[in-house]
Amino acid sequence: MDGDKKSFGKEKFRYLAIAESLEADIAEGKYAIGGKLPSERMLAKQTNASYLTVRQGIGVLAQKGLVRRAHGSGIYVTATKATPIIGMIFGPSLVEESAYFYRALREVLESEIAATPYICRSYDGFNRTDAAVPENSLPYQQLLRDCRSHPIKGFLEVGLKDLKWNDLEPLKGALRATFGDISGDVTLDRSVFARSALEFVVGNNRRKVVYLRNFLINQNDLRELADTAKRLRIPMPEVVPLEDNGQPVDVLAHDKVCQMAMQWHETGIWPEAMIISDDIATRGAAIALIKAGIRIPSEMQLVTLANEGINHHYGVDAVKYVFSPTEVAWKLVLVLEKRMRRLTIDEPQAITGDWASNSLEPANKHPKTLIA
């Protein structure tokens, strides 16, 4: 209700009309749960109604359990009839051109939540904002506004780099299911990708390998890569990190591969295969390889981690090992559902991928002469 006096139709008892208007204000978030309503005398002045009429209207809200009177203190909102929210918190900004996987994941999550009694709200770009100054964050302010008018059932957190957000209201103490490299209930098992990709290229008689890697937190893939190289009796692949300096990952990959190509030309020693941990990075790397005059796949085989159902044009033939956004979404929703029902949660769900249907399997994937 605003500061102007409101008139109410004669077809209803005035106290009921006042109650309905206040209930609408509560549902819209003007008065948050735990917040305080104006005094009954102030409401009487605003609505041009008598004090007793307003008191009757407040009584209707109290009977519904929406407000409570605190003697000597005032009238407080205790509940709202608004539909509960399941919030989706994305660290990356979904408007970024490279956020294909996260947009696909959001689409599946929205579809899954649509089949529940709850409504879905999406908030992204948290990684761009310092958790110490949330007031500067547009997505955080949107989250706060929604929480004033809707009860929160739980959160699905995706790719959140700074876990300090979980110490702030309304995330603090809330039920959640998480996906990410820092601390995730659901993760991508990139160690399987590293092993499978190396087995793949070795099966095609490629022994000198470069591993272009853009995730720098979890080291499991590197341990698996070293173990696989030892088992296959080949040199450890050269690991080339793509340090995050604020540039798009395809630009980072392009510049890094251009630098390496200059060294290859100088030394005359070329890798026979390149494994890349990101399909957007592969796009930039492929352009650099084309510039360097390297023929793919005859001179160098290209294997990339990718996302199922998301097709990028690399300009060269790249073999794809894909993860499913749909499977990630299902696992996340399942974890949150179990927490809402107070059920036991399994160990973190590590999701494995598989070769894309259009990938060409090597004729001899596991050569016996190389396996210990």
Image: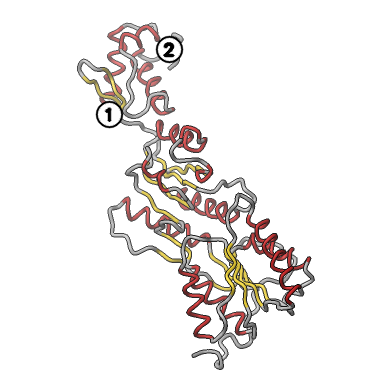
Q: Position of residue 159 (x, y in %)?
A: 49, 53
- Tell me which colouring the rendered structure shows: secondary structure
The quarter of the rendered structure image containing the N terminus is: top left
Q: Amino acid at mark 1?
A: Gly
Disc ID at residue 65: 1
In the depicted view, which residue is nearer to us: 266 or 241? 266
Q: Tag 2: Cα neighbours inside 10 Å, few (<14), some, or many (≥20)?
A: some
Residue located at (69% from left, 59% from top): 255
Q: Quadrant of residue 201?
A: bottom right
Say if 262 sits above or below 127 in the image: below
Residue located at (32% from left, 53% from top): 339
Residue, disc 2: 8
Q: Quadrant of residue 49?
A: top left
Which callout, 1 or 2, points at the residue further toward the start of the chain? 2
Q: Position of residue 116 (x, y in %)?
A: 41, 48
Say if 94 sits above or below 358 in the image: above
In the depicted view, which residue is nearer to us: 257 or 44? 257
In the depicted view, which residue is nearer to us: 254 or 351? 254
Report the side of 239 relative to 289 (left or right). Answer: left
Q: Tag 1: Cα neighbours inside 10 Å, few (<14), some, or many (≥20)?
A: some
Residue located at (49% from left, 73% from top): 192
Q: Amino acid at mark 2?
A: Phe
How far is mark 1 from mark 2, CA to CA? 24 Å
Q: Position of residue 325 (x, y in %)?
A: 53, 60
Disc ID at residue 350: none
Residue located at (59% from left, 65% from top): 306
Q: Report helix, strand or loop for mark 1.
A: loop
Report the side of 101 relative to 169 (left or right). Answer: right
Q: Report helix, strand or loop for mark 2.
A: loop
In the depicted view, which residue is nearer to us: 105 or 259? 259
